[in-house]
Amino acid sequence: MVDYTQLSDPNAEYTMRDLSAETMGVTDERGGVRDAEITDVQTTMVDGNYPWILVRVYTDAGVVGTGESYWGGGDAEIIERMAPFLVGENPLDIDRLYEHLIQKMSGEGSISGKVVSAISGIEIALHDVAGKLLDVPAYQLVGGKYRDEVRVYCDLHTENEADPEACAAEAERVVENLGYDAIKFDLDVPSGHEKDRANRHLRNPEIDHKVEIVEATTEAVGDRADVAFDCHWSFTGGSAKRLARELEEYDVWWLEDPVPPENHDVQQQVTESTSTPIAVGENVYRKFGQRTLLEPQAVDIVAPDLPRVGGMRETRKIADIADMYYTPVAMHNVSSPIGTMASAQVAAAIPNSLALEYHSYELGWWADLVEEDDLIQEGRMPIPEEPGLGLTLDLDVVEDHMVAGETLFDEE
């Protein structure tokens, strides 16, 4: 029995470490699954509507975790260079390993860019491993559940994205037939009135054309769906202000990334100039970058891309900062089912989740990449109760859709 009166005495028989070990049933020589070690890290790239970089972490416990890094080239080579820093480590030490990789890769730019997205892919895989080792869903590792399913918004496209009537027709089709009550269109589309797109300035006819797209799509779905619009960092501060003001009379869910992502002072000015909600965040890395958006309240909605900006725990930390300023989180996402589920697991665990993007509605085999069925149901993503991410890669489908020259994972 511990004598609690002796805890402040350095010469006492028990110390705080002894108390923690005794009360929690942990010994210095941990046994069972908690003694697992990482044995290998592998990647392969799948040719989806984006090139998805899948990451697998292998352990001597026979447990394999799967993650996903943000799309595009470069990440796989970075992950290969980081693998020696992970082999022999305990996969349960997710935070320590994350910071270890950030520090080891600091000379290669680990505050942003491809290094952070590569680390994000590993970090997601570590959550999958840890959940399987501890027999808990990944959401339990980032705080537990606020909701059993996550609202999904569908990113829509048409053959002629500059045609307001075509956009309206696609909005109607997806809302009516596919069951989504949240959608998004690109608004940085050619209007035919441009004189010089490189200067980012919008002439009045260009703004009028964008208003036509917004009017057509929002009126087509009415109150059946929320409609957001993405500008992809395309406009000057002044043009963004003028556009946002013109859209105030329409039911715009949010206007996304209207100005380039580097200067958050300009972003704040745009947000403060309009009642049209402004969403930003997929190009802002880690909690440190997002803090400079959130502390001055330079956004109405923050939109981190989890496999890009830092991974599951980092996105949870971003959401916590956002919650301090009563700002909702609408996660950007262009991932395979792996990255999408990682985002959904975090979205389930934060109070301020607004919605999660789905970018592959036109890709018929997106869901085939995993063995589980019905990943998205009526515009919602149910959160599985199976350990880890709750998904199982179908390696045959992965092999069928690998980028040329890629090598399939080991099965175990």
Image (cartoon, grey):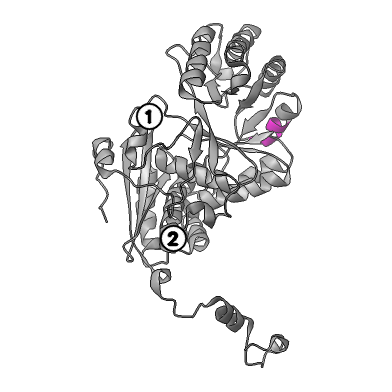
Q: Is residue 207 left or right of residue 141?
A: right
Q: CA distance from mark 2 to mark 1?
A: 33 Å
Q: Position of residue 13 (x, y in %)?
A: 62, 92
Which of these two is toward me, 362 or 387?
387
The residue to which callout 2 is attached is: 135
Instruction: Please state which amino acid type lies under the numbered disc 2.
Output: Asp
**Could you tell me which residue is drawn at 44 percent across and 42 percent down?**
339
Q: Is residue 265 on the magenta stretch?
A: yes
Foreground mark, 2 or 1, reads: 2
Q: Is residue 349 on the magenta stretch?
A: no
Q: Is residue 34 left or right of residue 401?
A: right
Task: Point out the tag, 2 or 1, that comes first from the N-terminus.
Answer: 1
Is residue 403 visible from the viewing direction of this image? yes
Give the magenta range: 263-268
Q: Position of residue 223 (x, y in %)?
A: 63, 19
Decide: few, some or many residues near mark 1? Use Cα within 10 Å; few <14, some 14-19, many ≥20.
Answer: some
Is residue 276 depicted above or below 115 in this figure? above
The residue to which callout 1 is attached is: 49
Q: Provide the major secondary structure of the magenta segment.
A: helix
If the image is split into quadrants, where does the N terminus sit?
bottom right
